Image: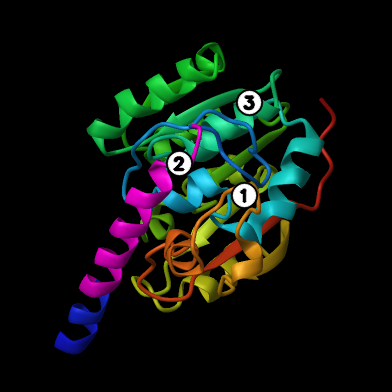
Amino acid sequence: MRIRKIARTLRRRKIAQAQSVLRSKTDGHIASGPFQGLRYITDSINSAWSPKVIGTYEKELWSIVEEIIDKSYKLIIDIGAAEGYYAVGFAYRMQETKVICFESEPNAHLLLQNFAKLNTVDDQIEVFGACTPEVLSEIIYSDQRTVIICDIEGAEYTLLDPKKVPGLKNTDILVELHHFVCPDIAHIFYERFSETHRIELIQTNPRNYQDFPRCLTISKKYAMACMDEDRPCSMMWFWMKTKEVLVN
């Protein structure tokens, strides 16, 4: 355990050095990916900043992000929104869509609001504190095409429960599963949602130098560190789409 902790400390030091180099190379816009061109802020909450401004952050989800955009949802509920990478990104790409954000970290709220203003999408976005099953039930409407984006460090087990929030049965959901917090989370969610949703499993893949956007000039050593998302282990997501087609 001690060796692992030392290794992660050294890794984070390398990431910090790489980010310092990257800040001098970017023009303040996301360089690649589905949110390319978005003006980005200079900080992030509880996740690495550099993969976001590069655009390689959670690259495994690019096709799903584009699918969400193509479906023109009327409402996106971003739970665990942090500084707003997805909230502002989707609002930027989906100008007729409302985005409701939940974030328990108070320091993230001002960052998210400033990020939204920077990209002139602040009129599409509302920001609240921690989400509860009761609040979630109130904002999901059966006649409004809705998608939930959820990344809440293991609390998805408690929040995303159709017994507590019946509206989840009619809602598409992209959720990061924190199996290092709850080892059985994938099995539990499959049992909860397999009758009402088609479930696709996505897993993290290691980055390689070819993933780094060619529009940025940086050494290979720093490029690889800049794409490091500093995760404690490999991660997985469930992309859960309702089997019933709703008519707006």
**Quarter of the image containing the N terminus?**
bottom left
Queried whether the magenta region covers residue 104, the answer comes back as no
Mark 1 and 3 residues: CB-CB less than 8 Å, in contact?
Answer: no
- Marks 1 and 3 sit apart, C-alpha to C-alpha, by 20 Å
User: Could you say whether the residue bearing mark 3 is in a helix, strand or loop?
Assistant: helix
**Closer mark to the observer between disc 1 and disc 3:** 3
**Quarter of the image containing the C terminus?**
top right
Image coords of residue 56 (percent x, y) = 58, 55
Queried whether the magenta region covers residue 21, the answer comes back as yes
- Residue 47 seen from this side: no
Image coords of residue 132 (percent x, y) = 37, 39
Question: How many numbered markers are drawn?
Answer: 3
**Closer mark to the observer between disc 2 and disc 3:** 3
User: Could you say whether the residue bearing mark 1 is in a helix, strand or loop?
Assistant: strand
Question: Between 33 and 185, which is closer to the camera in this rendering?
Answer: 33
- Marks 1 and 2 sit apart, C-alpha to C-alpha, by 11 Å
Q: Earlier in the sequence, mark 2 or mark 3?
A: 2
The colour scheme applied to this rendered structure is rainbow
* Mark 3 closeness class: few <14, some 14–19, many ≥20 residues within 10 Å: many
Q: Residue tagged by mark 1?
A: 173
Q: Tell me the magenta residue range.
A: 9-27
Name which quarter of the figure residue 199 lies in. Answer: bottom right
Q: In the image, what residue occupies the spot 74% across and 54% down?
A: 63
Q: In the image, what residue occupies the spot 50% across and 27% down?
A: 100
Q: Residue tagged by mark 2?
A: 79
Prevailing SS of the magenta stretch: helix
Q: Residue tagged by mark 3?
A: 92
Name which quarter of the figure residue 240 lies in. Answer: bottom right
Q: In the image, what residue occupies the spot 81% across and 47% down?
A: 244
